[in-house]
Amino acid sequence: MTKDIDTYFNSGCGRCKLFDTPQCKVHTWHDELELLRKVILESTNLNEEMKWGMPCYSINKKNVLMLAAFKEYCSVSFFKGALIKDPENLMVSPGENSQAFKQFKFRSVEEVKSHQDKLKMFIYEAIELEKQGAQITFKKPEEYAVPEEFQHRLDKDPALKEAFYKLTPGRRRAYLLHFGQAKQSATREARIEKYLSAIRNGKGLND
């Protein structure tokens, strides 16, 4: 993955084989991303760095928001977006099980310009929430359904089960969400298989 901001905007995130090609999603939304970056940097003192292959902006080492490029849009994602006042519902959750993240999607430079003031308001509020130490109350891991395929693995492998329940609540929750979001059993099985070693080694989804 890309670890340099300039490389990201020039060549892409490095998360797929389209890196440094005209088909890279970062190139598709280059002008929009550059304008969003300008809005963020000119209106705040947030620290800019690369995390997970994407530009991430933080204050006091706490993540506030990040930029991302997708096939049909680019976005500003707020780590505690669920706490931000959004009466016009301009932001959306990236998934039905998302409890904190909210995305502000953009599909043109004109759209960025027309919503620039609203975006700044969201950014300012997100910064204040972080300064105040605002926290989101997450559902406990035991409140999530364990996918049948994963439960089967846990039942037949006591060592795996022990390792999974030794993980922190946040790591267990992330795994259950990741496995459960797959609509097809084969996809769930593939996701589970991919992370068995990490679970046994006490690592989280993104470690």
Image: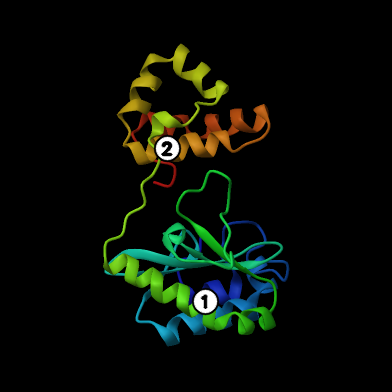
Color encoding of the figure: rainbow
Q: Judge left or right: residue 36 versus residue 3.
A: right
Give the residue type at disc 1: Leu
**Image spot of residue 6 (x, y percent):** 50, 78
- Does label 2 or label 1 sit earlier along the sequence? 1
The secondary element bearing badge 2 is classed as helix
- Identify the image quadrant of residue 127: bottom left
Residue with the mark numbered 2: 173
- Identify the image quadrant of residue 162: top left
Residue occupying the far bottom of the picture: 42
Residue lying at 48% horizontally and 56% vertically, measured from the top left: 101
CB-based contact (under 8 Å), mark 2 and mark 1: no
Tag count: 2
Q: Closer to us: mark 2 or mark 1?
A: 1
Residue with the mark numbered 1: 119
Residue lying at 65% horizontally and 57% vertically, measured from the top left: 17
- Is 34 placed above or below 86 here? below
Tag of residue 152: none
Other residues around mark 2 within 10 Å, as few (<14) / some (14–19) / many (≥20) = many
In front of the other: 131 or 42: 131
**Image spot of residue 91 (x, y percent):** 57, 64
- Marks 2 and 1, Cα distance to the nearest angstrom? 30 Å
In front of the other: 172 or 207: 172
**Image spot of residue 78 (x, y percent):** 46, 63
Give the residue type at disc 2: Arg
Residue lying at 40% horizontally and 35% vertically, measured from the top left: 172
The secondary element bearing badge 1 is classed as helix
